[in-house]
Amino acid sequence: MYIKRAMPVHHEVEDFDSHHLVNEIPDLILMLKEINTPNEYLNYEFHINHILRRLWFEINFKKGINLRDREKLEPVFLELNRIFNGAKTAPVAFRGVRASNFDPNIISETYSLELGDEIKNPKEKRILQHLEGLAYGLRSWTLKFSNSVEWANLAGTTKDKIIFQIENPDIVLEADPFLRDGCERTMHPLDWDEVILFVKNPKIVSIEKIENEIFLIKIKDN
């Protein structure tokens, strides 16, 4: 059963309306609970993957499922990870993002960091609220550092580039087994090397400048 949790969205974040397919999630969960193998899943592949692509893959285009509704997909991803025997944990995962529009240079304007400089356990409330808000929740991460750098570099803006790093996270869904065995006839709703994590209580461990305009933010999930 899906248990509603409060999604702490920063009050200055502009969220969008979820696609109407969000209403299909309860039925989707019931359907997945009846599936036990990848071969069985292929009988429902088009229907399920279509919904996932519309809700999850299109988030970066301000479409799909919004921040406030996103965790409704957690039981869907958990069922997929069961069906496709995905990994339960990872040694390390990364997430590349840009600072939010309401405070686009929050790190570079707060700290004067040279390459290799590191701040451990930052205390500034403005920094913590912003970064923890970007790390919190059901989101896409990657097992490859290079992929996170590519995501941080997307779009030609001057916003601070952020790479989150978390060690030993619990995985909600490992994408590769699902993409390999559950997407024979449909377009992929996830990316290769992607893992879905649900970071519930992120804490900022350190901020390090690793490249020009790129900051490595190590976090833990208490």
Image: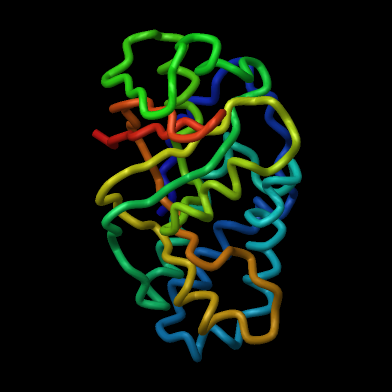
The image shows residue 139 at horizontal and vertical percentages of 50, 46
Closest to the observer, 56 or 18: 56
**Residue 164 located left or right of residue 46:** left
* Residue 63 can be seen in this image: yes
**Residue 198 located left or right of residue 27:** left
Asked if 188 appears above or below 182 in the picture, the reply is above
Q: Quadrant of residue 203?
A: top left
Q: Quadrant of the C terminus?
A: top left
Asked if 86 appears above or below 20 in the picture, the reply is below
Q: Quadrant of the N terminus?
A: bottom left
Q: Residue at x 40, y 62 (%)?
A: 78
The image shows residue 215 at horizontal and vertical percentages of 47, 30
| Extreme residue toward the front, this view | 115
* Residue 76 can be seen in this image: no
**Residue 206 located left or right of residue 129:** left
The image shows residue 221 at horizontal and vertical percentages of 29, 36
Q: Residue at x 41, y 77 (%)?
A: 83
Asked if 168 appears above or below 113 in the picture, the reply is below
Asked if 102 appears above or below 146 in the picture, the reply is above
Closest to the observer, 214 or 48: 214
**Tag count:** 0
The image shows residue 117 at horizontal and vertical percentages of 36, 23
Q: How is the image coloured?
A: rainbow
Q: Residue at x 48, y 65 (%)?
A: 193
Q: Quadrant of residue 97?
A: top right
| Extreme residue toward the bottom, this view | 39
